[in-house]
Structures are given as C-alpha cells and as structure tokens.
Image (cartoon, rainbow, N blue to C red):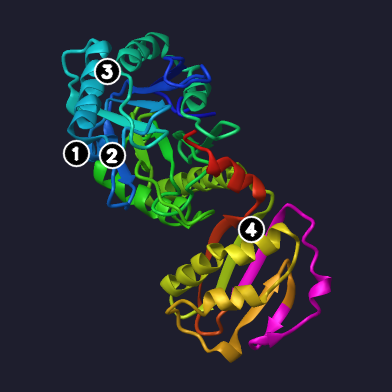
Amino acid sequence: MSVTAPQGFRAAGVKAGLKKSDDPDVAVVLNDGPSRSAAAVFTSNRVQAAPVIWTREVVRGGRVRAVVLNSGGANACTGPLGFQDTHATAEHLAAALGADDVGAGEIAVCSTGLIGERLPMDKLLPGVDAAVAEASRAGGLAAAEAIRTTDTVVKIAFRRGTGGYTVGGMAKGAGMLAPGLATMLCVLTTDADLPAAELDAALRSATAVTFDRLDTDGCMSTNDTVLLLASGAAGVTPDHREFAVTLTEVCADLARQLQLDAEGAEKMITIEVVGAASESDAVTAGRAVARNNLLKCAIGGEDPNWGRVLSAVGTTDAVFEPERLNVAINGIWVCRHGAAGDERSKVDLKPKDVTITVDLSAGPHSAIILTTDLTAAYVHENSAYST
C-alpha cells in the first residue's frame, strides 16, 4: 500500500540513532528496474537544504536508481561540509547496492528535521547499510515510518491504473505546510514504463492541484522534495492523461493525510473559491483566507466570523467588486453581496470538517485550498521545537 505497491521496488526503514527518541530514522527506496526514469519537484524557498541542491542535479539526468531519506536532521544551512555529507551519503548507498552500473549520480538524498546542524555521519552511513540489507517488497510501511518527524501517523497511498500498472507513495509532513509542496518529503513510485519527460509533466500537473494547494500555516520549508520513480516492471505504457489522473489521485490522498495530521489541528478547513476571473485569482484569494490567523482562530473556537473572510480576500489583487462578494460557511450563506446574509447562528461548526465557500462573482474559474484551524496545541508544539 506504499512505495512498494508497484512492481520493481524494495524499501526499508531502520533505526540509526539520529533521533533521541530511538525511533526509526533512515529509509531507502530501491528501484530494481528495468527502467530508472525519474522526475521531481522541489521547494521554491531560496534557502535550500544540501539534499535538495544535490537531488535537483541528480534528477536533471532523468534517472534515479535509489533514494535514501533520513529524519532527525534537515542538513540545511550547514555550508559546504553539509553538501559533502550529502555527496558522501549518495556515494555510500551507491556502493552498498553493489552494482557496477550504479554511481552517486543516480542516488537521490532527502533529509528532514532541525535546520542548522550537521548530520552524524558515523550513525547515518551504517544506517544506510542496514536499510539496504533489510530492503524488501514488504518494507514500504517501515520506510514511511522512518521519515516521520512530528507526524503522528505514517502517510501512504496507492492506486491501480487502467491496463495493469500501479502508483504508490509515502509522505511525511505535519508542520510548515505551505507551498511549494507543503513542506514535505514524498516518494512516489510506479511500475508503468514512461520516460522522464512524461513523468515530469504528470508530476507537475499533479502537485499543482494537490500538495501546492495545502497551506496550513503559511510557512515554507527548506527541504521540500517530491520524487517520482518509474521501474517499468509492469511493462505497461499508459496514456499520459490517464496516468496523470491516477498520479493526482495518489497525491490528493497523501495531501489529505497531511492535512489531517497537521500540528495541533482540530478542524480541517476547505477553502472553495468560485466565480473567479482566473484560476490564479481563485488560488490567491483562497490562500489569503487560509493564512488569516484571525479566521483560523475563529474556526477553532467554532465562531462563524465571516467578516474575517472578506477582510482576507480584500488584501489580494484578485479581480472582484466588494459589493458582489458572497460567503458560505458549511453551506450557510452568511454573507450576500458584501453584507450580512443568512443568520450566522445557523452555521454548525461542531464537525471536524469545515467548508468555506467564497464567491467572487467575477468569472467562471475556481480553486480549492486546504488548511486547518489555529490552536494552542500548535503554538505549544512550535514554541519549543529545538529545545
């Protein structure tokens, strides 16, 4: 049900001692082929971790034989020595695979954890060896477990595509969930036989409407990486549109799991913007609402304060006329034509899922942004993350 659901992949997760908790912290995902096609998307943060810089160059070649991932340290803002550590990790995994045709240039590296500290290589590299030794088709769940940081549960998904291929995936992410990519590590796998260019196009279209639409706290990571690997083991070359739909379903499933496990969250909020002049306007307005802390606190307190929705939309450059704005909260149109609508006391905010619909009355386009409420638990968890 994870990255090993497609044929041609093995995975493992082990304890290397990177975490003080002694939880699993090193994972590998191995592509046994016959294909090694790959694509990836990364954080748009200008401050990028060494593994992001390394893996971006690896993926330019369109081939990835294996991925090594660690939690317990981000290896971000660690200077040239941190980059050397990433290179050494890739070389070590390549050597551990014991194949003459595998070099560090086909090894992706992903890290997650506290920014600003180097990784203990004397623990990480033996962990890589242990993970390679344990890698199997049954190791997908263990790999997903090993990449957790503040995540309370593993996040895995898979779908069967038309014609006999499969797409699987695992992700981690609970805090700093904002684009690009919702502050996460994610490995997606498929046994379809597709070239790197088609994988890249499908991945970018999928992430644009899933991970990039998850915005729980407006904070963007230095380490975001979403990798897509194709083994070709099913011997199936699907229609590119059909494959993109299947891949998007897996990404949407994982994005929802990320939302459900967001740090401190009690309410799962769907911001639905309709009537926009463009999709870009819909995304801009929706993201402004999703990042409005006053509104997020109101939803946490089950207070349908629709004025905070309008004030958030009003900070954007989206096309709209204030007197034509309409807002519904859980189906109750509390604002009509920029003024009070149905009685706000009719809104039931007790359910975990909350939907806020914003009608800009400016065009035919729409977009959905996922967010959460703002709670004391979120503040508590992030007030002492490094201490």
Q: Earlier in the sequence, mark 3 or mark 2?
A: 2
Q: Earlier in the sequence, mark 3 or mark 1?
A: 1
Residue 188 horizontal/vertical position (percent):
41, 36
Q: Nearer the viewer, residue 197 or 188?
A: 188
Q: Earlier in the sequence, mark 4 or mark 2?
A: 2
Q: Residues within 10 Å of mark 1 (few under 14, many from 20)?
A: few
Residue 93 disc label: 3
In this rendering, position of residue 324 left or right of residue 317: right
In the image, is residue 364 above or below residue 152? Answer: below
Q: CA distance from mark 3 to mark 4?
A: 41 Å
Residue 77 disc label: 2
> In the rendered structure, are the residues bearing label 3 and label 2 in contact, judged by CB atoms less than 8 Å apart?
no
Residue 231 horizontal/vertical position (percent):
33, 28
In this rendering, position of residue 147 left or right of residue 62: right
Specify start and end residues of the magenta stretch as a single range: 334-358
- Considering the numbered disc 2 on the image, is that residue within a helix, a strand or a loop? loop
Disc 1: which residue: 57
Residue 90 horizontal/vertical position (percent):
24, 23
> In the rendered structure, are the residues bearing label 3 and label 1 in contact, judged by CB atoms less than 8 Å apart?
no
Residue at image location 35% in from the left, 30% down from the top: 235
Residue at image location 54% in from the left, 54% down from the top: 216
Q: Earlier in the sequence, mark 2 or mark 1?
A: 1
Query: What amino acid type is highlighted by mark number 2?
Result: Cys
- Considering the numbered disc 1 on the image, is that residue within a helix, a strand or a loop? helix
Q: Earlier in the sequence, mark 1 or mark 4?
A: 1
Residue extending farthest to the right is 346
Task: Check residue 346 for magenta coloring.
Answer: yes
Q: Residues within 10 Å of mark 4 (few under 14, many from 20)?
A: many
Q: CA distance from mark 1 to mark 4?
A: 37 Å
